Image: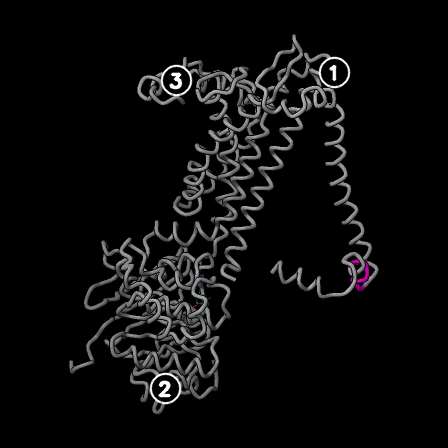
Amino acid sequence: MRQALIKEQAQTPGKWWRRWLRWPASSGDWVFQTLTLLAALCLVGLLVAMALYLLAEAWPSVTLFGPAFLTSTAWDPVRGVFGALPAVYGTLATSAIAMIVAVPLSMGVAIFLAELAPDWLRAPASFLVEMLAAIPSVVLGLWGLFVMVPLIRDPVEQWLGGNLGFIPLFQGPPFGVGFLAGGLILTVMSLPLITAVARDSILAVPNSQREAMLALGATHWETISRAVLPYARSGIIAGVILGLGRALGETMAVTMVIGNGYQVTLQLFAPANTMASKIATEFNEASGDVYIGALVELALVLFAVTLVVNIIGRLLVYWTVSDTSTRGQ
Amino acid sequence: MEDGQDAKIVVDGLNAWYGSVQALRDVSLTILDRKVTAVIGPSGCGKSTFIRCLNRMHEVAPHTRVQGKVTLDGQDIYAPGVDPVTIRRRVGMVFQRPNPFPTMSIFDNVAAGLKLGGLAPKAYLADIVEKALRQAALWDEVKYMLKRNGTALSGGQQQRLCIARALAVEPEVLLMDEPCSALDPITTLAIEELLQELSREYTIIIVTHNMQQAARVSDKAAFLFMGEDRTGFLVEYGDTKEIFTNPKDPRTEGYITGRFG
Ligand SMILES: Nc1ncnc2c1ncn2[C@@H]1O[C@H](COP(=O)(O)OP(=O)(O)OP(=O)(O)O)[C@@H](O)[C@H]1O
Ligand SMILES: [Mg+2]
């Protein structure tokens, strides 16, 4: 489809922008196109301006530390030495934990809501999931700190450390706050998002697909796993990307339960920090060009990481979609 | 009964509803084993609903209800404890609108039914798929692109793909809902020949709006009609020859001669 379009463009003489200018049949079309183009350019401009502004603010840190900023694990405001690695690692690790727990869980909930739940349960259960998404993150953070963290310390971490302590992930003292707590609070935050999007894309699968599989003698579960989920997969992936985006950027709730450590370690119980929580914790008290610059540079890195994740996600969706329409061509 | 006249499916007092709307009233007839039965009637009279009741697909749509008795080889398919999955394995279906699986290749589409239940006979899979595609008169058009996506086919090719998919699992009874509606005359002829050939082993029930086709392919014909209340009922059922040359009911005669419907 896309290739055909490109080919067509290549065959038509003239530059694409000239074709674009000539193409509209009426002046109304022309005005509309120009307006939408301007709006789109404004958005791009805003994004670029933001990045440039951040870069200017971060400049003292960028010039002082260079690329080593990304690989250094130091964070010492007193000596003025800063490195981003533990924060980047913290963001990626907590988001990974969140996805590992949230994706299967929300798939289960979405399948239940869309395919299995009795009619009377469907609407209230969907509403509850959506309510979960509406909880302000500071409230969720408080709940995390006072309810979830004590439960994580004991029994979860006690049990894991006692029984699976030979695995590096589960070694070290059970602090309660740390990578695990941060990951789990992010699970709670991304779950409703992934669930809602996945449920909607499952509901959008035409009934004829289910009937086609059922008529071949498929069980209910075979119908879901072989006809419904494959059909809905690009929507489901989009939902996961959305959830991941939320997990990467979430600040408040994570800050409250992550324990304000700064280390790269496999030990999930250890206190940690994410890029977002590091910035939130220290920005108010930061002083001096380099310190502030380092925090802003952290923000730039976060910006870049989210961008890369989103691009990868887009590509994944694009591939699965083109896979379904033109595979083998 | 004499040879070849055994009852395969006996429908007794069948009623079907969509919500509170009754779509079928009191349909009773006997489908003969290894014969082709045509179901004809005006649009909306309940032909699709009728055949969907024969493999328990009617209940898949929300808020639907079936009443009455349908037996397959003497077994009541609506008896409590009967798993609809086992019924659908024996009674295959080709739907009115082609519904290939868009995420699967042409090959996998045809093999989809064979892979169910985790009993894919891997060694024969390719042979069975080829045979089914040949039967559905599609093999020559797709043999070099079996890995290509099922939706990359034309509407008529998709229809034949769905026929092949239903044939691959070798059901005892095949329900076909207007299987030739998107096919050209030559391909239609190929499918009709297929039906003749299949009727040596399979019991076939075909819904069609094409009177010539019904006359050509079927041994038995059922004429459904609907009254003012839009509830379908069976007007006449008998040998196709009788129905088309000597209909007993004036409504049947009117319909097949094209006076209404
Ligand atoms: N899913 C549905 N929900 C509600 N009503 C339905 C549904 N499907 C069919 N009906 C109604 O049931 C009646 C019979 O429909 P059916 O599809 O069986 O007709 P048909 O004889 O197959 O028509 P056609 O020749 O146009 O395919 C129609 O009045 C239709 O409006
Ligand atoms: Mg129909």
Question: Which residue is disc 1 drawn over?
Answer: A289
Q: The residue under label 3 is which amino acid type? A: Gln
The image shows residue B109 at horizontal and vertical percentages of 40, 62
The foreground one among B198 and B28 is: B198
Whether callout 3 and callout 1 share a subunit is answered yes
Question: From which residue to which does the magenta span run?
Answer: A20-25
Please indicate, yes or no, whether residue B30 appears anywhere in the rendered image.
Answer: no
The image shows residue A249 at horizontal and vertical percentages of 59, 29
Tell whether circle 1 marks a residue whose Cβ is less than 8 angstroms from ligand 1. no
User: Disc 1 on helix, strand or loop?
Assistant: helix
In this view, B223 is above or below A150: below
Q: Residue furthest right?
A: A27
Q: The residue under label 2 is which amino acid type? A: Arg
Q: The residue under label 1 is which amino acid type? A: Asp
Gap between marks 3 and 1 measured at Cα: 39 Å
**Mark 1 burial class by Cα count in 10 Å: few <14, some 14-19, many 20+:** some
Residue at 16%, 83% in the rendered image: B2
Subunit under mark 3: A
Question: A1 left or right of A266?
Answer: right
Say which quarter of the image contains residue A12.
Answer: bottom right
Which numbered disc, 3 or 1, marks the residue that appears first in the sequence? 3
Question: Which residue is disc 2 drawn over?
Answer: B216
Residue at 60%, 37% in the rendered image: A308
Question: Which residue is disc 3 drawn over?
Answer: A171
Is-magenta flag for residue A10?
A: no
Question: A144 left or right of B5?
Answer: right
Gap between marks 2 and 3 measured at Cα: 78 Å
Total of numbered circles in the picture? 3
Question: B126 left or right of A247?
Answer: left
In this view, B145 is above or below B103: below
**Mark 3 burial class by Cα count in 10 Å: few <14, some 14-19, many 20+:** some
